[in-house]
Amino acid sequence: MQTQFSFEGALSNAFRAAHVRSFPWLFAAAYAIAFTLFGFLIAFLAKDAFLAVADGFERLTASDFDESDPRAMLGLMFGMLAPLIPWGITASLGSWAIWAMFESASQRRYVRDERFSLRFGADELRMMAVGFFWSLFYIVCFGLPGLMVFNGMVGMLDIAASDLTENEVARRILPVVFGSMGLILLILPVYVFFATRLAPCFAMTIKDRRIVFFDAWNVSRGRFWPILGAFVILSIGGSVVASIVSQVLQVGIMMPFMGGIDDVESADDLFRIILSPTFLVPVAVYALGRLFMSGLLQHFTGAPAAFAARHDPRGGVDDAARMAVFD
């Protein structure tokens, strides 16, 4: 079956899809507000846990702990971070649900031509499942190599803390460094290939109203380079703009308010400054600006794969709409 899929269509989909004058800006603004409020809520509720961790690090700094044992030091540090684990899980689950709401709204625009709206229903639950499968896919690709790199870094700390000469330390550390870099360089193109081929799964989940993951492979067949090329152009261009906005916000808003932190002498003083309006307001403005750009980037970079899903070779959205006229 002939389809209207093309590289030009994939690249311009975000700017030609329905409601182009309103949807991206409403999406990004709501995205920024939702994640900023959620982040502030988690930080407020977890402030006692943060204080406990900060006090633990203060006691560690003042103690006579033997820093020559890197593994023991890492174990102690991870143990002190234990109060933050429940809040980390809570933040992850909440972010997962919020992400699913926005990703579903984004794909409904591309696939169903819907206006911007946020809700939590069947679409969002299916999107959470797809997001979970994508996370597993990411862990499979990078989890084991990441563990190997971490173990290599710990080994490097052991070597650096030993009584070896500088030349011996360099001789042992360099293979770990270059081996880790080589491993990442080998895995990255494999991940890019599979990620591109499976990218339409989010839009397909909205289109078919069922959980779609591996079936996205059929939709991207023969479309790898157009999807990847359009994604790279949009992501690079968007990242450059987002970086400029971030730098402007840092220089114009954050830096004038960071000087007071340098004079703190205890964790209580630090948190008193952090929880003051003179600090929270600029942080909120900075977070809103950064997250607004992140929301735009998420929505725009999802357009190429969504365009492929909309023009499914087995029957696209426009094909179904034309056939519905005769029903």
Image (cartoon, rainbow, N blue to C red):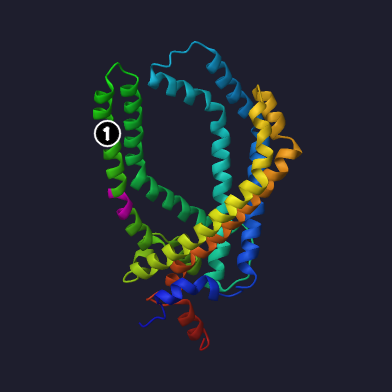
Residue 104 place in picture, x, y as percent: 55, 61
Name the foreground residue: 301 vs 317: 301
Please check the rendered image and state whether residue 239 is part of the magenta-colored stretch, yes or no: no
- Give the magenta-colored segment's residue range: 186-190
The amino acid beneath tag 1 is Leu
Secondary structure character of the magenta stretch overall: helix
Residue under the point 40% across and 77% down:
6
Instruction: Name above or below for residue 158 compared with residue 240.
Output: above
Question: What is the residue that sits farthest to the right in this orientation?
Answer: 277
Question: What is the residue that sits farthest to the top in this orientation?
Answer: 64
Instruction: Name above or below for residue 108 compared with residue 139.
Output: below
Residue under the point 69% across and 39% down:
257
Which of the 4 image quadrants contains residue 283? top right
Q: Would you say 121 lies left or right of 5 here?
A: right
Quadrant location of the N terminus in the rendered image: bottom left
Residue under the point 72% across and 29% down:
272
Residue under the point 49% across and 10% down:
64
Instruction: Name above or below for residue 194 compared with residue 53.
Output: below
Q: Would you say 107 lies left or right of 46 here?
A: left
Identify the element where label 1 is drawn: helix
Provide the residue designation for mark 1. Answer: 174
Which of the 4 image quadrants contains residue 143? top left
Residue 125 place in picture, x, y as percent: 54, 55
Q: Would you say 3 lies left or right of 111 here?
A: left
Q: Is residue 200 visible?
A: no
Q: Is residue 275 visible?
A: yes
Name the foreground residue: 120 vs 230: 230
